[in-house]
Amino acid sequence: MNTEILGVIFIFLLSLLLAWPLGKYMVKVFKGEKVWTDFMSPLEKLIFKIAGANPDQSLNWKENMKALLVINIGFFILAFLFLALQSLHPFWNPNGFGNWEPTLAFNTAVSFTTNTNLQHYSGESGASYYTQLLVFCWLQFVSAGTGIAACALLFQGLKNKASEGLGNFFNLLVKSCTRILLPLSIILAIILMVNGTPTNFEGLQEVETLEGDIQLVAAGPAAPMVAIKQLGTNGGGFFGPNSTHPFENPNYLTNIAENVAILLIPMALVFAFGFYTGRKKLALLFIGVMSALFIAFVAVSISQEMNGNPEFTKLGLSDPTNLEGKELRFGPAASSLWGVSTTATSNGSVNSMHDSHTPLSGGIFFLDMFINAIYGGVGVGFINFFVFVIVAVFIAGLMIGRTPEFMGKKIEAREVKIAALIIILHPFLILVGTAISSYLSATDQSLASEWIHNPGYHGLSEMLYEFTSSSANNGSGFEGLGDDTPFWNIMNGIVMLLGRFLPIIGPLAIVGSLAIKKSVPESAGSLQLETPAFAAVLISVILIVAALAFFPVMALGPIAEFFSF
Amino acid sequence: MIRQSITFIIISLVIFGVLYPMTIWGVGKLMPNVSNGKPIIIEGKLKGFENIAQEFSSENYFWSRPSAVEYDASSTGGSNYGPSNEVFLQEVSDRIESILQSHPEKTKAEIPIDMVTASGSGLDPYISLESALFQSERISNARSMDNDQLKQLILDHKEAALLGLFGPKDLVNVLKLNMALDNISPSLTNN
């Protein structure tokens, strides 16, 4: 069998295989049971002591959300100040980079706080090592921890029987960082480093090439940052072209390790849902639904990239494989798997240039981000998926004429209203943003030439991608877009904020109201969730919501480009 | 709430922004070669990095894949051209023409696709085996060496898939190949 395809299958199966035990482990961490990382507890106790926090105090959803928001505002303010005043710190800045322009600092601080990691800057030519570590590396941990902690609150809420305490956000945040993200990152960072990802503090190094020219090579403490960027579904690369760069992703082995790391925690959280609530079968159904969509998307993307660019054939070349923007050591198959993985999980790191993918492969990446819950970002992916589940339960309940129930709790008007609003928010942010930017670029030729790198349908796709990636907190880009301008910095910043916090607060509000409800005993009339019929309803809801809202704009972008060949 | 936020921010900043990377850096000190990105140092001079492509434009070297950033390893990236972009297609077409000029014995249909498409990073260290073989006649002519010997050198540098099972196979690291080439016929190094 083709080794490229075999590699893709191996990466997918390895991710699932590792996610199962990790899910079990995470549940133990959430519940405070004995685990091998208990040696971290003196450190955690110290944090709780200085913070004056009682980690065992279970709070209701509103108190937890308040804690989440306050600490995230703190993250943002500090990150903004560090970036805007980058030149002030005297060390770890061997290349002497200066202060960031305020709108870029705003955009980037929001971007890393919201676990998006949209990058309107290029790492090796704008960020000092201090910034890379004390802003980016740090935020990649704590923003991922925020998502995981929120997801654990959701699990507890689904389990509650008529009690409002969802657990303690602060406790969960600390432990997600120290016991889940940190150990995994250390392992991955060392794997990367052994394979040639640099971890040094040198400035630009001067190479005398074989032909006698001088080549300046940027390096730095990349391995630790690349590790957390993958595991926390952050995606903010150390270097501009992210994991296409041979230093970030030196060979196929590191590509396997990084791609598994992208999928690992999002998958594990689905299993964790099963272990936490005791509904393992339901968790398997969820992972099955997600995987069915995931595999279908990967298959489309790979076949499109391998069939290649028909224009190449017209130029007289015999092999049309689309290798533009791709690295040979990964090849088109692993590039497509990564593309789907990174957009489906809201990671946003890339190992090939998405802008240069063929139209339908790019279209698949859009679809992944429109849904934003096929595994999804760490924590928030499952939270988004939960919203689809609520809507699916509601629709299925109506179809059989029963009061819709989820895990023994009645789904009523309040829950459905919130779910519907959260579902509408995503297309609203994306389509309104794209409409405004399209209008501006259509009426002002100078803006169009400043922003858009590729003309025609693809140009619309570039703008659509930027807003989609912002709203989905993804962070990848059609990087041709000239996006370091006040318009994009501010607009994307606002979209990222709304797209991050409302879809956490809304579902937690739903769970908050489910948690205090008495559970209804299951009867013959209850909706059975662990059935193929419900899986089909769920898939339909996901596809209809994503496809219907976005079909018109997709028809003008990727689909139109496809038919233009 | 403010107190717990400030506490966490400060302590987490120290753990994840300083201690964690410094730990990895410390581990890296145990293997100074790899933790510096696998540099190739000859007679005390930094001649390159194993995985970072260099620009080769002379007749007697294998050429790397096209780079959208002119192999600038301090500011890397891809072309970001969409597949239907006229500018992009013109660029590919120009590359085809210039390759045919330097390889007059070859036809368009023989040109491997990796020779006319730019990589994502602009620093792809590899070319395909086909691409290396495609260039071999030009190089053996320029170096007046035996083409079969050169072909053997290429095959010796062919890298298999991971464990022979996973990922692309039959790739050639251009820098390593060119260095080996210089070892065989060193007189032409500074041609």
Image (cartoon, coloured by chain):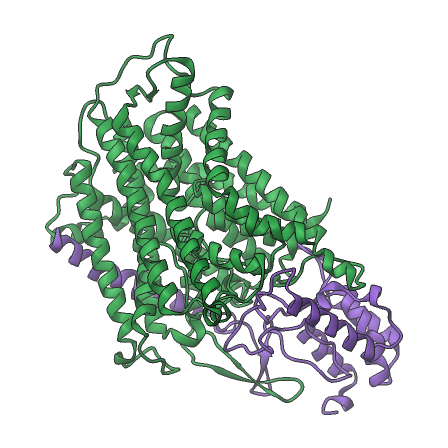
Q: Residue furthest top?
A: A524
Position above or below: B45 against A347:
below
Name the foreground residue: A516 vs B14.
Answer: A516
* In-image side of A383 versus A288 (left or right): left
Which chain wears green? A
Q: Please say if A149 is above or below B160.
A: above
Residue A4's spot in the image, x, y percent? 67, 50
Image height of B178 relative to A147, above or below: below
Q: Nearer the viewer, residue A152 or A31?
A: A152
Name the residue at 27% across, 65% down: A79
Query: Which tint is chain B?
Result: purple
**Residue A415, percent from left and from top:** 28, 29
Judged left or right of residue A194, residue A68 is: left
Residue situated in front as seen by the camera: A439 or A293? A439
Counting from the top left corner in percent of width and height, residue B19 is at 30, 64
How far across and how far down the image is residue B149, in percent? Answer: 85, 75
* Residue A263 visible from this viewpoint: no
